[in-house]
């Protein structure tokens, strides 16, 4: 008896080791830097470059391991030491808390695992990639994705101009932008110009989808769709806080806290960031901004083993912004001398915005083969951009386009001439709402060797923009603007545009051996109306009422195929119809095109690559009269006739080092794009003007190259990201003539993340390391610079 007790005691006192490997749920990616904690003890470690970890000196006992990694769901695992073998632990991507088959249907890509088997061109930027640089600028976050054309404006990405596959980039009005699968633009049908864009700094992931599969995500189906996935509700009590500071008094706080119980879970979150601005106002005023985001989610769900599992998720968010931003750029001559200058005539320019979002999402697993996901949503947005519009009756865009012709007016803008009442400052005061209900029915089953999946979607939607604007007049005295007279609200623009839309789609996916095919069809029924009360009726009595309407019904088909050539490569291709709504003018036709893509994908021995070609043949290309693009600001759409957009997208990633302790990932991306008009016509749109067949579409760079390089160690991440963009025409024309253009651009950013402890990381980064300053745009009015060299440093805490 004594001997038995002694042996038992010795066994308990003896020390054992614990070894294992952390991999992604797909079994392909070994996770470096995953944290492994032995609950209730002081033991903790992180995985190495091959996902391996080792903990020594554990007594024989039962333990709970807590395994976490950025971008993955935290996992708890019960073990008993000693173990006979190494353990393999899989972590699942943190996307949204739904079954995998549903995630594939209600997100664009289905996460990294979905990208690898996509039938078209799909990209997923997860939390690990986002955390590397901690950008709050969506333009920089997307810089390594091929096929994206971006026109910078303010240097901070506050109001991005994004196009996909050579579509127009003006206010991202030619792509479908969503947050959590819900349309994010303030009025995506009535006024698609996105003066609000979800803050990328609070997002868990970003998805980009191009090709025929995007027809599920209208109304814009030509270039592609972008979906921003907000922070998911955690599976256990946890939180996160980032504190980052930088030059120009840059400050950023991002924090969230959440918990999960058996039948109720929640998360609360805030993102707040601001800067004093990098431009130098003539009177030394502030040119910066302040943004605040607040978000809360709560989920109620049945027991996991309920006969019909259901969940109900409530989401509410608010966002506020105040930015001392302007449409006023510089003349070429002044840019050469002081590229970061801002004229005195913009000293009162400011935009204030307020955004509220509400949604209720219901999920029901009705049967093993049938799931239903329904969302009810409402977005309210208001903004007033108070900015210089005219000088002595001449628009600032005309003055900056022809500074020699308007020398006296430019002198006033510079604050060099004193004059009474020459400056007209417009209050671009607008309010928006967008609301609707959408449902996805997901049918999936397997019969023999065939896998079937059908998505059926319905959406009832309406949105509205209400313009109620006025103009104030200012004197210029010794470089200081003085209010001379105040305008009456509603006397500049006084109209309401609204849209009602019903959309539906059916998409059927069949997998048979090496061949996977998807065929889909989308239907859009849109009624656009405009009610103009006129400038003489600010009380909206209807004495000078003008109305117009434009109805459109359209069917949008798409087909995609993928064939596995081997276990590590496949070819894919697709064809689909492109579409964009025509607005409320009866004579305006919808934008229509036939779009084709063909590509090859490789995933072998650590090499991942893809190359494809695309060809978009427009029967009618739409232009938009936006003040942001140098127009009058009516936001009317107009026909641009036939056009072609074509190009090549290529990307490759490879780990240059297979050593035990660190990785050296390298990624190279290239995009060739060419978009040109295929007919002759005269346009009232200044950026197009008199178009000759073969003229290039403005603001589409022909060549883009991005190269990123890093060193990944379990204690630190070091990353360098570079981007080259060839010059872009700013008016329709030829690269070989004297058509105005932007500069070619090359920038380098670097970042270092260092793991101080299992809960704390230190962060430092520098953007535009070489401090290259170049012309990024000649609109809305005049030449505009990029952001110069900037640095950030801070701490990131997890608990």
Image (cartoon, rainbow, N blue to C red):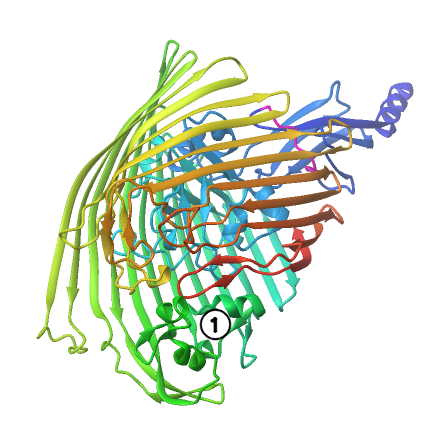
Q: Which one is nearer the viewer's eye here, 90 or 165?
A: 165
Q: Where 346 sits versus 671, above or below?
A: below
Residue 11, located in which quarter of the rendered image? top right
**x, y percent for residue 427:** 33, 75
Residue for point 40% across, 39% down? 674
The residue to which callout 1 is attached is 324
Closer to the camera, 74 or 775?
775
The quadrant in which the N terminus is found is: top right
Q: Nearer the viewer, residue 516 or 47?
A: 516
Residue 247 drawn at (x, y percent) = 65, 65
Please state the total of marks drawn on the protein image: 1
Quick one: label 1, few (<14), some, or many (20+) residues within 10 Å? many
Picture residue at 49% right of the left edge, 85% below the top: 479
Q: Is residue 176 magenta?
A: no
Residue farthest to the top, as pictured: 448
Residue 241 found in image quarter: bottom right
Extreme-front residue of the structure: 737
**Which contiguous range is marked in magenta?**
27-35
Q: Nearer the viewer, residue 260 or 434?
A: 434
Disc 1 secondary structure class:
loop
Asked whether residue 338 is in view, the answer is: no
When the figure is inspected, residue 274 is found, relative to residue 10, above or below; the finding is below
């Amino acid at each position: 008896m004594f001997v038995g007790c002694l042996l038992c005691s010795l066994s308990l006192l003896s020390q054992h080791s614990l070894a294992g490997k952390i991999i992604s749920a797909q079994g392909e990616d070994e996770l470096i830097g995953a944290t492994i904690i032995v609950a209730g003890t002081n033991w903790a470690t992180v995985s190495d470059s091959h996902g391996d970890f080792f903990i020594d000196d554990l007594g024989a006992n039962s333990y709970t391991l807590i395994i976490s990694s950025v971008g993955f769901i935290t996992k708890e695992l019960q073990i008993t030491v000693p173990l006979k073998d190494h353990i393999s632990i899989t972590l699942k991507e943190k996307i949204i808390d739904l079954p995998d088959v549903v995630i594939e249907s209600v997100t664009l890509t289905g996460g990294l695992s979905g990208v690898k088997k996509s039938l078209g061109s799909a990209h997923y930027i997860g939390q690990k990639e986002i955390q590397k640089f901690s950008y709050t600028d969506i333009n920089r976050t997307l810089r390594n994705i091929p096929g994206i054309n971006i026109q910078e404006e303010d240097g901070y990405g506050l109001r991005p101009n994004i196009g996909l596959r050579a579509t127009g980039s003006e206010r991202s009005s030619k792509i479908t932008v969503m947050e959590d699968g819900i349309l994010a633009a303030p009025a995506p049908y009535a006024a698609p110009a996105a003066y609000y864009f979800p803050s990328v700094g609070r997002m868990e992931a970003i998805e980009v989808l191009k090709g025929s599969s995007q027809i599920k995500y209208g109304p814009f189906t030509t270039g592609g769709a972008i979906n921003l996935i907000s922070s998911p509700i955690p599976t256990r009590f946890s939180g996160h806080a980032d504190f980052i500071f930088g030059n120009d008094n840059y400050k950023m706080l991002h924090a969230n806290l959440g918990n999960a119980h058996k039948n109720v879970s929640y998360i609360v979150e805030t993102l707040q960031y601001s800067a004093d601005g990098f431009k130098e106002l003539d009177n030394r005023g502030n040119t910066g901004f302040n943004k605040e985001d607040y978000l809360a989610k709560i989920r109620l769900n049945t027991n996991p083993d309920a006969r019909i599992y259901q969940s109900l998720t409530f989401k509410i968010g608010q966002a506020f912004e105040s930015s001392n931003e302007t449409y006023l750029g510089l003349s070429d001559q002044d840019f050469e001398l002081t590229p970061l200058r801002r004229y005195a005539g913009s000293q009162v320019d400011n935009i204030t915005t307020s955004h509220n979002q509400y949604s209720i999402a219901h999920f029901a697993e009705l049967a093993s083969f049938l799931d239903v996901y329904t969302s009810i949503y409402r977005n309210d947005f208001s903004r007033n951009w108070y900015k210089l519009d005219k000088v002595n009756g001449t628009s600032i865009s005309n003055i900056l386009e022809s500074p020699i012709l308007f020398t006296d007016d430019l002198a006033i803008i510079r604050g060099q001439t004193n004059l009474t009442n020459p400056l007209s400052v417009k209050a671009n005061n607008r309010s928006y709402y967008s609301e609707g209900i959408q449902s996805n029915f997901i049918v999936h089953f397997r019969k023999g060797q065939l896998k079937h999946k059908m998505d059926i979607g319905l959406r009832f939607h309406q949105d509205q923009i209400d313009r109620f604007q006025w103009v104030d007049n200012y004197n210029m005295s010794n470089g200081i603007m003085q209010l001379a007279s105040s305008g009456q609200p509603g006397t500049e623009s006084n109209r309401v545009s609204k849209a009602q839309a019903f959309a539906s789609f059916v998409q059927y996916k069949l997998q048979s051996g090496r061949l996977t095919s998807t065929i889909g069809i989308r239907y859009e029924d849109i009624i656009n109306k405009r009610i103009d009360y006129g400038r003489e009726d600010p009380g909206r009595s209807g004495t000078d009422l003008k109305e117009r309407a434009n109805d459109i019904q359209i069917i949008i088909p798409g087909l995609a195929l993928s064939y596995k050539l081997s276990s590590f490569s496949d070819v894919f291709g697709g064809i689909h119809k492109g579409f964009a709504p025509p607005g409320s003018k009866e004579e305006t036709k919808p934008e229509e095109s036939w779009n084709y893509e063909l590509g090859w994908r490789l995933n072998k021995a650590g090499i991942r690559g893809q190359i494809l070609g695309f060809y978009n043949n427009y029967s009618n290309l739409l232009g938009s009269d936006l003040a942001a693009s140098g127009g009058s600001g009516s936001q009317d759409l107009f026909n641009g006739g036939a056009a072609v957009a074509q190009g090549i997208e290529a990307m490759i990633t490879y780990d240059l080092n297979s050593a035990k302790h660190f990785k050296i990932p390298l990624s190279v991306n290239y995009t060739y794009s060419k978009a040109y008009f295929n007919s002759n016509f005269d346009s009232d749109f200044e950026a197009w003007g008199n178009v000759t067949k073969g003229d290039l579409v403005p603001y589409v760079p022909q060549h883009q190259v991005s190269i990123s390089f890093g060193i990944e160690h379990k204690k630190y991440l070091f990353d360098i990201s570079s981007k080259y963009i060839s010059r872009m025409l700013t008016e329709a024309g030829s690269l070989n003539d004297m058509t105005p253009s932007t500069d070619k651009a090359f920038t380098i950013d670097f970042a270092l993340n260092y793991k101080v402890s299992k809960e704390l990381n230190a962060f430092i980064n520098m953007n535009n390391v070489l401090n290259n300053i170049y012309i990024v745009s000649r609109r809305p009015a005049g030449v505009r610079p990029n952001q110069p060299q900037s640095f950030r440093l801070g701490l990131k805490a997890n608990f």
